[in-house]
Amino acid sequence: MPYTYEYPRPALTVDCVVFAFDPSNKSLKVLLIQRLADPFKDSWALPGGFVEMEEDIETAAKRELKEETSMENIFLEQLYTFGTLGRDPRGRVVSVAYYALIPLQKAQTPIAASDAKAAKWFSIDKLPPLAFDHNDILQLGLQRLRGKVRYQPIGFELLDEKFSLSDLQRLYETVLGVQLDKRNFRKKLAKMGVLIETDEYQQNVPHRAARLYRFDKEKYHQLIHDGFNFEL
Amino acid sequence: MPYTYEYPRPALTVDCVVFAFDPSNKSLKVLLIQRLADPFKDSWALPGGFVEMEEDIETAAKRELKEETSMENIFLEQLYTFGTLGRDPRGRVVSVAYYALIPLQKAQTPIAASDAKAAKWFSIDKLPPLAFDHNDILQLGLQRLRGKVRYQPIGFELLDEKFSLSDLQRLYETVLGVQLDKRNFRKKLAKMGVLIETDEYQQNVPHRAARLYRFDKEKYHQLIHDGFNFEL
DNA sequence: TAGGCTTAGTGTAACAAACACACTTACACC
DNA sequence: GGTGTAAGTGTGTTTGTTACACTAAGCCTA
């Protein structure tokens, strides 16, 4: 059998770190599920599960996300592959972790689907203990997000289609963990030219209503292509 | 059996993209091996192979690198996990790719060890056709290297302990694919303060000998820790 | 040993980007 | 109509980035 190689194989799983941002209280959220079965029954964990034999890894991640949280059409990016011995009590399990950024609105109600007891958003500063090495995975996802913010406008992914400049600023302040100057922030955004102002304003706010903006996706892709630096 | 989950599993492999830099002709090199066995017998490929059941993934990458090229003590960083269906004619194979940057001197003579017919450095602009999807993997490694250069001083990893400023500049010019101004380049390096000048000079050169420098590793780690930007 | 070849090494001025900073406007609610 | 809250807007200062050209040192050869 020259074209096969049979040997004991590690099991292969996927895990998803899905982030969202809530501008109203400047909190970064992560999507967790409560496990139905042992090991770690009833513990909170990242959505994920076993990769099937005839299924692309990313497809498996999307499938598991849907089966456990009902979320669909989410753009996943590969994060890291975790494979240390002993990370899973069931035996040798290697897990490919993915991460995603989504607007909170699109995802307001994760529904615990067939494979989870519950599915919920948690603020990253109020996390429950997590199953397996999922805390490590989550922390790496956070690190990646904080790195990504420096060369790509993450607002595209974490905000609704229309948003105020203050919302965008709050997002950057939360992810970067710093205070930014309102005028300088707006000046830089204006220079980048990836924002389009709309004629719409915030509704039902007890103060002056902010103008809403959208991202100019074409211009954005052009800039990405030219290696533009989106640091703010 | 609540704590096991048996099902058909993809095979798990590792592949290594090892880069080196030759300042004398400004060429970036990659380490390839010639395959001993089918599939792709006699083709050139990235060093790599199957992960054993009781072995960490990175350990497997190091082991394969040694078995095929005799290279040891190389710092590997995870690159990406490739798992599309059909990437290996033997069946479902998922591969975790690693990459490494090493000084050419340390690695001058890769020796085809037990598991390869040959092992050789190739200039990245004169590559042979590669087995499997190894060209994709290599290109991703290159992309990562070009990204990394912008926030970490890759000279640390790709140059010998002592080097001239011109060597370092040639490295940056090659990886970034641009020409840099000598005076501005040196000015920025001086400001970073990660270089220590030694009392030594180049030997046996048919022109004025350049002073040799070393990196200040402590200062470097301090700066990395503070989120310093090493762009040049 | 003088002249030529090659790379090393060095400073300044113009321009662009980053930063610090405070008041007025609009709207809702009481 | 007064109060509370967040929106929106410009300038001067400092800092970093760029462009640019000559002298120094050592080897080679005629």
Image (tube, coloured by chain):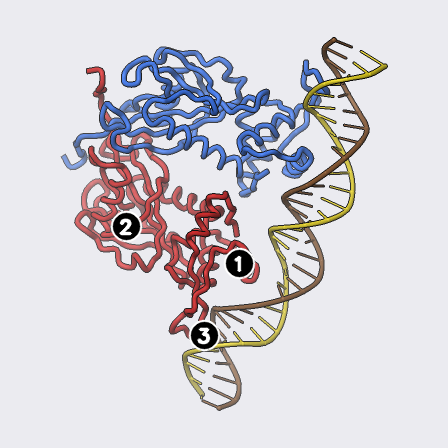
Chain colours: A blue, B red, C brown, D yellow
Residue A80 x %, y %: 37, 33
Tag 1: amino acid:
Ala
Labels 3 and 2 share a subunit: yes
Q: Residues within 10 Å of mark 2 (few under 14, many from 20)?
A: few
Residue A126 x %, y %: 46, 22
Q: Earlier in the sequence, mark 3 or mark 2?
A: 2
**Observer-nearest residue: A124 or B150?**
A124
Tag 2: amino acid:
Asn
Mark 3–mark 2 CB contact (< 8 Å): no
Picture disc at residue B207: 3
Residue B100 x %, y %: 34, 47
Q: Secondary structure at mark 3?
A: loop
Q: Secondary structure at mark 1?
A: helix
Q: Earlier in the sequence, mark 3 or mark 1?
A: 1
Q: Earlier in the sequence, mark 1 or mark 2?
A: 2
* Location of residue A73 with respect to D21 vertically, above or below: above
User: What is the chain letter for disc 1?
Assistant: B
Of tags 3 and 1, the one toward the viewer is: 1
Residue A51 x %, y %: 30, 24
Label 1 belongs to which residue? Answer: B190
Query: Which residue does the image show at 26% across and 58% down from the upper left?
Result: B109
Query: Which residue does the image show at 41% across and 46% down from the upper left?
Result: B142
Of tags 3 and 2, the one toward the viewer is: 2
Q: Residues within 10 Å of mark 3 (few under 14, many from 20)?
A: few
